Image (cartoon, rainbow, N blue to C red):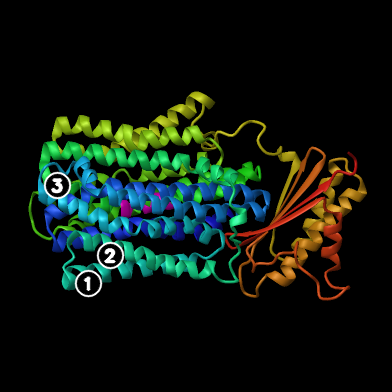
Amino acid sequence: MIRKLIKQMLAAQTLSALTVSLCLLIDSIMIGRFLGVQAIAAYGLANPILLVIGAIGSMLAAGVQVACSKSLGSGSKEETDKGYSSAMVLMLGISLLFTALVLLFRYPLATALGAGKEQALVDQTREYMMGFIIGAPGSMGALVLVPFLQMAGQSGLLIAAVLGMTAADVAFDLLSVLVFHGGMFGMGLASSLSYYVAMAIAFGYFLSRKCVFTFSFRLVTLKKIRELFVGGVPTVFTMASSVVMVFILNKILLRIGGGEAVAAYTVLQNIGNASNCISTGIGGVSLTLSGILYNEEDRTGLRELLKLLVRYAVMLGAAVGVVLLIFAPFQVSIFIPEAGVAKELTIQGVRLFALGLIPCCINNALKSLYQGTERVTMTEIISVLEGALLPSLAALLFSWLWGVSGAWLYFVAGECLTLLSIALFIRSRSGSFSLPSFLMLKQDFGVQPENLLEMDIHTLDDVTAAAQAAEQFCLRHGQSEKTANHIALCVEEMAGNTVIHGFAPGKDNHLSVRIQHKGSRWVLRFRDDCQAFDPVHYVPKGENDALGLRLVTAMADDIRYTYSMSLNNLTIKLSDTNA
């Protein structure tokens, strides 16, 4: 089932990563074609502010993924709703405050970002920031809504929002340059409006009765806000490191190559950010699933998750890297149609960038996995190494040796050195380079294999076999026949109902059953990919309906249901009658 989940989530996560970079990519193309190289340089100088907006939105989105993966892993809908309500209020407050600050201080910000005393460059940088910052609530809101759409199984709506945003940005950009002649302010405003289009498309679900989340100001708590911030801190390290690196690279390139080198770097960033959506997507899948599996104490699931993520990282990183190597001239021509120094520098930079995609994807998978499994310090260290320290040092050293061509090695050198640093640390800690050692799990994490029974169910015959296996599993652990019968009945009733009423004809539905013995308690987890059905709050029509479900509910000490990522998740806890 983990393989199926990764496939379902990866495309949507990758597309969701485009919610910010796609508008920036389109703006860069339009600016290069209609406003010239100096305008591209101004756009590049404004990039740190744009990255800060993305950093805040990404921080809240990551905090949502961490906090809600815990509540989903424990089966608490109320805690998930608290995360939803708190995130919405927090996003709106922060985005409005940030908008006001940038609008008030846009002139000194443009100067501080490196525009210098050249008035035309200062004005263009300031104007683009002013237009773009108006869309900060939409930009941050789009990022924060992404994990909730994923958890609700609304991948199709997510894709529709991204496509709608893309079409709107192209249309608004063309109107700005061809009809209204809005200059850099118009380009920034076009992006702002397109973010609000994406928000409008996505928000239709959250206002509908189908929404699985409940918003209430009563559910907004300081404790949950603090949890969102703590969960998102590692992402702040990542994004802040990116801001620092962009600032340093701009300074280096201005010194050794002037405005044309900065323009080339701006185009390289946009192509790189679009290409890096695969690594961001892998990281998003890693963060969400590792958090759920970690809180379920599923060591086997985490091993399979990491193995599959590394496999996808290599495959996708190699595929996108080959595309960049071959089609670099064509891609750059979209941004810079005229031949010249800036165009040649950009083509060279794109091809060197392509070499770092595989280690980048692996680093993102590991970094997010450590965040999901509460190895926050490890995530923060990797973020600083990968995002700022190692690429900046590489740019300084290699630019001193080979000029702008050497500076382009910042990405591949930074990613490779970061992956090497992680591997050497794991080796020093565990004495092994084996893939499971990269999980960094404690020896006592989860349940021992002898206390765990996992089964996949596809037919009613499988249900009968699973119930018998569960009964024998309990008896082997010295349980009474009463306990063994209770657990076997739970498996038979819940799994049987799922196969009979949930499995759709002709569809490859899947049901997994996990039984673990923890101390004096038995924990049963049922997970299926059928239509949403909440057996905990289901109200039967008549007294004779759902007798098996009523019996299971009566036997259970605790029973919880959640629906996330298009999956029904049911957790049942029963006491050990021998205890």
Outermost residue to the right: 481
Q: Which residue is mark 3?
A: 345
**Of label 3 and label 1, which has the lower sequence position?**
1
Neighbor class of circle 3 (other Cα within 10 Å; few <14, some 14-19, many 20+) is many
- Of labels 3 and 1, the one closer to you: 1
Distance from label 1 to label 2 (Cα)? 9 Å
Percent x, y of residue 569: 67, 57
Percent x, y of residue 102: 30, 49
Amino acid type assigned to the residue bearing label 3 in the image: Leu
Outermost residue to the front: 104
| Residue 167 falls left or right of residue 298 | left
Task: Identify the image quadrant of residue 165.
Answer: bottom left
Percent x, y of residue 140: 41, 55
Q: Which residue is mark 2?
A: 190
| Residue 536 falls left or right of residue 165 | right
| Residue 48 falls left or right of residue 302 | left
Mark number for residue 175? 1
Does dot 2 land on a helix, a strand or a loop? helix
Q: Which residues are magenta?
A: 273-281
Amino acid type assigned to the residue bearing label 2 in the image: Ala
Query: Please, what is the dominant secondary structure of the magenta stretch?
Result: helix
**Of label 1 and label 2, which has the lower sequence position?**
1
Does dot 1 land on a helix, a strand or a loop? helix
- Residue at figure coordinates x 17%, y 45% from the top left: 262
Frontmost residue, 505 versus 77: 77
- Of labels 3 and 2, the one closer to you: 2
- Residue at figure coordinates x 87%, y 50% from the top left: 484
Does dot 3 land on a helix, a strand or a loop? helix
Distance from label 3 to label 1 (Cα)? 31 Å
